[in-house]
Amino acid sequence: QVQLVESGGGLVQPGGSLRLSCAASGSIGSLNVMGWYRQAPGKERELVATITSGGSTTYADSGKGRFTISRDNAKNTVYLQMNSLKPEDTAVYYCNVKWGLGYRFYSWGHGTQVTVSS
């Protein structure tokens, strides 16, 4: 069973920065995709960024140029560096990992709250 534990959320002023971390415990194999999603109140969960075990990344347009996703494969940990934060970035941020043939297995973290407000 794979468990994900997120950390690093909090309250930050507009223009500030936060770094989220997510550590996966359990076997996720050598080929997998780790990523971050977010859900704001009253909205659907949306993609923020993903990174494969090979280092290929994808970003939602909302975070391009401001967010950077990275990972440490030895620690099965994924990071999200968020700069120039805006109030509209306020949401619960969820970590996700997909693995197995066709990435048919997946797990979600419990989420960490990010609030951008003055």
Image (cartoon, grey):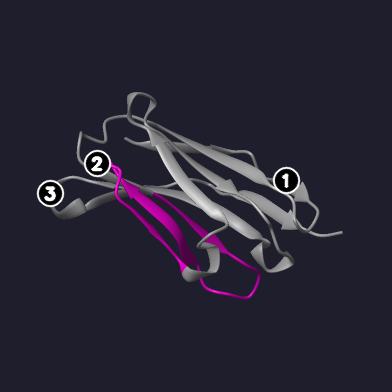
Residue behind mark 1: 10
Q: Is residue 59 above or below residue 21?
A: below
Circle 3 packing at 10 Å, graded few (<14), some (14-19), many (20+), is few
- Quick one: SS at disc 2? loop
| Point 56% across, 49% down: residue | 111
Q: Nearer the viewer, residue 92 or 71?
A: 71
| Residue contact between numbered discs 3 and 2, judged by CB atoms under 8 Å | no
Residue 68 picture location, percent across and down: 50, 49
Mark in the foreground, 3 or 2 = 2
- Quick one: SS at disc 1? strand
Instruction: Report the span colored magenta.
Output: 35-60
In the image, what residue type sits under mark 1? Gly
In the image, what residue type sits under mark 2? Gly
In the rendered image, which quarter contains the N terminus? top left
Circle 1 packing at 10 Å, graded few (<14), some (14-19), many (20+), is some
Residue behind mark 2: 54
Give residue 18's quadrant in the image. Answer: top right
Specify the farthest residue to the front.
65
Name which of mark 1 and mark 3 comes first in the sequence.
1
- Quick one: SS at disc 3? helix
Residue behind mark 3: 101
Mark in the foreground, 1 or 2 = 2
In the image, what residue type sits under mark 3? Leu
